């Protein structure tokens, strides 16, 4: 039903430190820049840093993961370790490093099968939810599939256009937290069908048109279903 992650929006108190971090430290290209937000190209997905001046706000303390080519990992570690206190985790044969952006979002750079060079997509986003069961039912009805249940019974991992982790409040790797009031955009062939699948459980329908539907999920996250 949902075919791609169009954007992830984060809240930035001040845009210039966010721009410097993502453009100069992580090498993302600025796609658009306005008085209230900066949009970066992260592969085919937009990363949006937005001042909290209106709704939807971007996500707070959001943990998410960029894809990098496996062969570049050591270079990224060496480059970033000179300035940041990095943490590392291993998942099978793949390694990930973790650091924080100026607004307290936990940014992961993980080895993935991508072409690069540099950051080439967003492969994971973590949302904080009140009830795992309620959130799982909601996102499974949008086409996500549950693939892992955490041993601590506080998190679920789902696969869809990207990996979606649903966390009840707790601290994860590198003391990361799930994001609150996160703004996500999803590509789909049929925005109205996506709305119909979850219309009885959304907090609100913010806008509905043939080519774009905007809703709030049961935990207050903004979801936009936009024509691919």
Image (cartoon, helix red, strand yellow):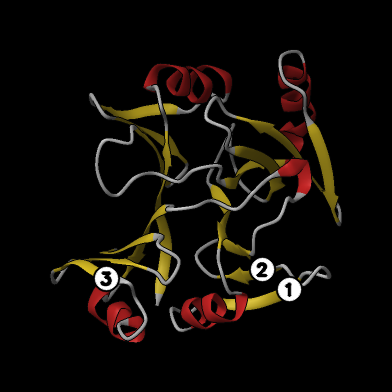
Return the residue nearer the eye: 196 or 103. 103
**Residue found at x 28% / y 85%:** 196
Badge 3: residue crowd in 10 Å (few <14, some 14–19, many ≥20):
some
Distance Cα–Cα, label 2 vs label 1: 5 Å
Element under disc 3: strand
First in residue order: circle 3 vs circle 2? 2
Q: Position of residue 193 (x, y in %)?
A: 28, 82
- Rounded to the nearest whole Å, what is the CA distance between mark 3 and mark 2? 25 Å
On screen, 212 above or below 183?
A: below
- In front: 140, or 13? 13
125 relative to 34 in the view: left or right: right
Q: Quadrant of the N terminus?
A: bottom left
Up/down of 122 relative to 68, above or below: below
In the image, is 68 to the left or to the right of 61?
A: right
Q: CA distance from mark 1 to mark 3?
A: 29 Å
Q: Is residue 156 left or right of residue 193?
A: right
Earlier residue among tags 2 and 1: 1
For disc 2, the neighbor class at 10 Å (few under 14, some 14 to 19, many from 20) is many
- Mark 1 Cα shell of 10 Å, populated few (<14), some (14-19), many (≥20): few
Circle 2 sits in a helix, a strand or a loop, which is it?
A: strand
* Image location of residue 115, percent across then percent down: 60, 43
Q: Which residue is mark 2?
A: 157
Mark 2 and mark 1 residues within 8 Å of each other at the beta carbon: yes
Q: Nearer the viewer, residue 90 or 52?
A: 52
Please name the residue that numbered disc 3 is placed on.
204
Q: Name the foreground residue: 149 vs 26.
A: 149
Which residue is under mark 1? Answer: 148
The image quadrant of residue 126 is bottom right
Spot the residue most to the left: 209
Whole-percent x and y of residue 75? 75, 24
Ranked by sequence position, the earlier of labels 1 and 3 is 1
Q: Which quarter of the figure is the C terminus placed in? A: bottom left
């Amino acid at each position: 039903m949902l075919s791609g992650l169009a954007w992830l929006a984060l809240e930035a108190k001040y845009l210039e430190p966010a721009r410097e971090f993502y453009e100069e430290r992580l090498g993302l290209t600025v796609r658009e820049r306005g008085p209230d937000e900066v949009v970066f190209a992260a592969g085919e997905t937009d990363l949006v840093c937005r001042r909290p001046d209106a709704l939807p706000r971007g996500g707070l303390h959001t943990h998410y993961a960029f894809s990098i080519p496996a062969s570049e990992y050591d270079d990224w570690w060496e480059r970033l370790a000179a300035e940041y206190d990095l943490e590392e985790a291993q998942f099978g044969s793949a390694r990930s490093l973790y650091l924080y952006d100026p607004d307290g979002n936990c940014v992961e750079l993980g080895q993935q099968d991508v072409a690069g060079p540099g950051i080439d997509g967003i492969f994971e986003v973590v949302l904080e939810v009140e009830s795992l069961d309620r959130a799982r039912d909601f996102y499974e009805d949008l086409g996500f599939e549950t693939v892992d249940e955490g041993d601590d019974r506080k998190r679920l991992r789902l696969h869809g256009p990207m990996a979606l982790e649903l966390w009840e409040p707790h601290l994860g790797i590198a003391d990361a937290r799930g994001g609150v009031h996160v703004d996500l955009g999803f590509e789909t062939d049929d925005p109205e069908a996506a709305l119909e699948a979850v219309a009885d459980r959304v907090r609100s329908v913010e806008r509905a048109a043939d080519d774009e539907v905007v809703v709030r999920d049961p935990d207050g996250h903004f979801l936009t279903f936009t024509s691919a």
